[in-house]
Image (spheres, rainbow, N blue to C red):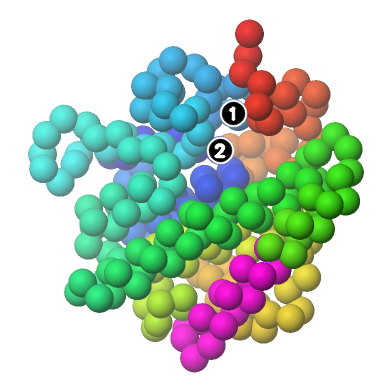
């Protein structure tokens, strides 16, 4: 059994995508990041950076004590190695999947996240920041579009953790949609993943876990999410 410390954000979706695809048994431990659950001592013991997702695997492959893992990319790698799925079987394949996973972790996620912050959540509009991150998000979508040419998925014909990591970060903000018109390969790839039954099951958890998803944040929630720890 895997305990998944989760809230329905792009990084949270990465892990439910894997768990649903792999058919692993898991239970969700909600981490309401708008209420400050990420600062609770019990959660910090497994995720010291006070970010979700995190997991605790009560049946690790070595048969030992439960294993905890934080950081979404590290969790995907752990689960891929545990199951032998969605990572490839040979060294060269693993290298390719891993570098595109790191591309998402170091580029697509952070830059699109900053785009979302300055277009959706920031208390005031800062035109320079809004343009900066819009342009960088578009640049990264262009990189992805080029990589997808002639490939069903990011690294070839097989769906991988690189796809699971990247999919939730493509146009995630309903209130500030990115222009995907210039990126036909991204649109084709994104639609194919959206149609997968496991993707639909994973995203159905959004309203189950957070019925208020999509509603405006309060000032308290905004403070907790954007740099102010609770007193």
The answer to whether the residue labelled 2 contacts the one labelled 1, judged by CB atoms less than 8 Å apart, is yes
Query: What is the x, y in percent for residue 90?
Result: 20, 74
Q: Residues within 10 Å of mark 2 (few under 14, many from 20)?
A: many
- Secondary structure at badge 1 equals loop
Q: Is residue 127 magenta?
A: no
* Residue occupied by mark 2: 7
Residue 71 lies left or right of residue 2; in this view the side is: right
Query: What is the x, y in percent for residue 37?
Result: 55, 22
Residue 85 placement: quadrant: bottom left
Q: Look at the magenta stretch and give its main secondary structure.
A: helix
At 39% from the left and 38% from the top, the residue drawn is 70
Front-most of residues 101 and 37? 101
The quadrant in which the C terminus is found is top right
The disc placed on residue 92 is none
Q: Residue furthest top?
A: 231
At 64% from the left and 36% from the top, the residue drawn is 210
Q: Residue furthest left?
A: 63
Please provide the residue range marked out in magenta.
137-152
At 53% from the left and 88% from the top, the residue drawn is 149
The quadrant in which the N terminus is found is top left
Q: Is residue 206 above or below residue 141?
A: above
Query: What is the x, y in percent for residue 131?
Result: 81, 58
- Secondary structure at badge 2 equals loop
* Residue occupied by mark 1: 32
At 32% from the left and 54% from the top, the residue drawn is 77
Query: What is the x, y in percent for residue 221?
Result: 72, 26
């Amino acid at each position: 059994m895997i305990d998944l410390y989760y809230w329905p954000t792009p990084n949270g979706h990465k892990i439910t995508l894997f768990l649903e695809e792999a058919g692993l048994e898991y239970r969700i431990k909600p981490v309401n990041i708008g209420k400050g659950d990420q600062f609770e001592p019990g959660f910090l013991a497994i995720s010291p950076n006070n970010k979700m997702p995190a997991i605790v695997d009560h049946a690790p492959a070595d048969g030992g004590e439960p294993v905890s893992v934080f950081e979404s990319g590290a969790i995907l790698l752990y689960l891929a190695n545990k199951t032998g799925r969605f990572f490839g079987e040979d060294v060269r394949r693993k290298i390719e999947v891993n570098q595109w996973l790191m591309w998402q972790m170091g580029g697509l996620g952070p830059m699109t996240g900053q785009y979302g912050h300055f277009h959706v959540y920031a208390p005031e509009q800062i035109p320079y920041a809004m343009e900066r991150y819009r342009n960088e998000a578009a640049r990264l979508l262009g990189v992805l579009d080029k990589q997808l040419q002639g490939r069903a998925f990011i690294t070839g014909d097989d769906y991988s953790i690189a796809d699971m990591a990247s999919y939730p970060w493509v146009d995630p903000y309903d209130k500030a949609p990115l222009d995907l018109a210039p990126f036909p390969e991204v649109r084709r790839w994104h639609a194919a993943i959206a149609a997968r039954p496991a993707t639909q099951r994973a995203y159905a958890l959004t309203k189950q876990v957070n019925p208020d998803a999509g509603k405006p944040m309060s000032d308290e929630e905004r403070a907790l999410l954007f740099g102010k720890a609770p007193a």
